[in-house]
Image (tube, helix red, strand yellow):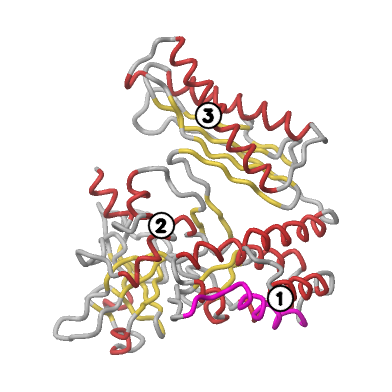
Amino acid sequence: MNNSAATLYCSNLNCQAPNPQSHNFCQKCRTPLLKRYLWAVGEGIEAYKAGDLIAERYLLKSDRIILDTKPALSPEMLPEISNSLMPYLKLSPYQLHVPQLYGLLTPTEGQRNAETWLLEQVPIYSCGNGEGTLMPELTSVWKNASAMRQLTWLWQMANLWEPLQINHVGSSLLTPALLRVEGSILRLLILQADRSSPVTLQNLGQLWSKWVAASHPTIGKFLEQVCQQLNQGAVQTAEQLVGLLDEAMETIGRSQSCTYQIVTRSDTGPTRRQNEDACYPPSPSSTNPSLPLAIVCDGIGGHEGGEVASHLAIATIQERVQNLLANPANPLNPTALTLELENFACAANDVISQRNDTEQRLDRQRMGTTLVMALAHAHEMYITHVGDSRAYWITRTGCRQITLDDDIASREVRLGYALYRDAVEQSG
């Protein structure tokens, strides 16, 4: 018979049956078992050893790695979140790279330990041979990576620089032990508070200088020059640094070819009588399509309104993207293309609004739609979204949400008022 420390409870609220950790599906209801690995922050965790079950729920696997054996239950929270933890909330739009605050680790009954917080979405493998272990440090895999992958990691650091610096945790990007990688994705283990003196791009240049010797021969000279510019103050903003890396990736990307497979499917769902969703391309699948564009819209509003709105949005955006890519005179640098896609979303909104006015729709009868789309161009993928339709990054090691819902709850998190699940409950 398995002891409690080896038990994983079903995440289905209507089931919550106990299961051995080795199982992938609940023995009772066949729901996939959620293996949520967490990272403990604080001195309180040092009072426990590997194998301990804390508060009859949290299994300490090793060091600070914890498995939540009852993922269906909400963790404990304090009425107020301390200022030291606020960056995790304010950086929630960067959840692909930055861990998120999960909850408070309640000490086992009878013990009084220092406050310990738990982080979720941390760089810990949740499946496969490495399950329950940290993902590798960037420095450990750097020398064997391709030129494009090395540039991609640096590009992500450059894009994270300003938001982390604004929240006084920029030093997180200067500590190699915190820089973990999941394939091409850079992930931070924790956020490290800056000391009294602010970090600078010169500090970043000094760190990157240590990687030049082991960089791919194709970009070695380029990276050396970038480090020199950073150290000399010639590159003064993160935006300039991103621009330099964009140019380098574009050069490398010209020698590479990409194959795309787009698969779309829409379902009416268990309650609706008609399907108000729409997607592009409408066919079930398309390998290496002429237009590497995927769109999903979830329509809302009035009799047949949602269905009309979602199709109007797709038709509007698809036409504009096609015209944009067909015009070789358009300078499609990353900034320009991002702005164009935002303009296309606004154009779709205008078309739907005009249709509402023409049909004299009022209040809840006015139709609308959410939107999420992905456009592949050169070496990059561009994501644009409106509403709560989401984009996810799915790999062999897990599934990560890329976009952040446009809702009141997400705004509350970004402002540092509450965790997302608490904000959802309050707004509901």
Q: Secondary structure at mark 2?
A: loop
Q: Amino acid at mark 1?
A: Gln
State the image coordinates of residue 63 (x, y, percent, origin top left). 41, 85
Residue drawn at x 48%, y 80% is 197
Residue 392, image x, y percentages: 52, 51
Specify which label sits upstream in the sequence, 3 or 2.
2
Report which quarter residue 313 is drawn in.
Answer: top right
Residue occupying the point 44% across, 38% down: 387
Q: Nearer the viewer, mark 1 or mark 2?
A: 1
Q: Which residue is mark 3?
A: 278
Which amino acid, by three-letter code, is at mark 2? Pro
- For marks 1 and 3, the one nearer the N-term is 1
Numbered range of the magenta stretch: 197-213
Q: Is residue 212 magenta?
A: yes
Residue 298 part of the magenta segment: no
Q: Position of residue 317 (x, y in %)?
A: 61, 29
Q: Tell me the distance, in whole angstroms, between the alpha carbons under discs 3 and 2.
A: 28 Å
Q: Could you say which quadrant of the image residue 7 lies in? A: bottom left
Circle number at residue 232: 1
Q: Quadrant of the C terminus?
A: top left
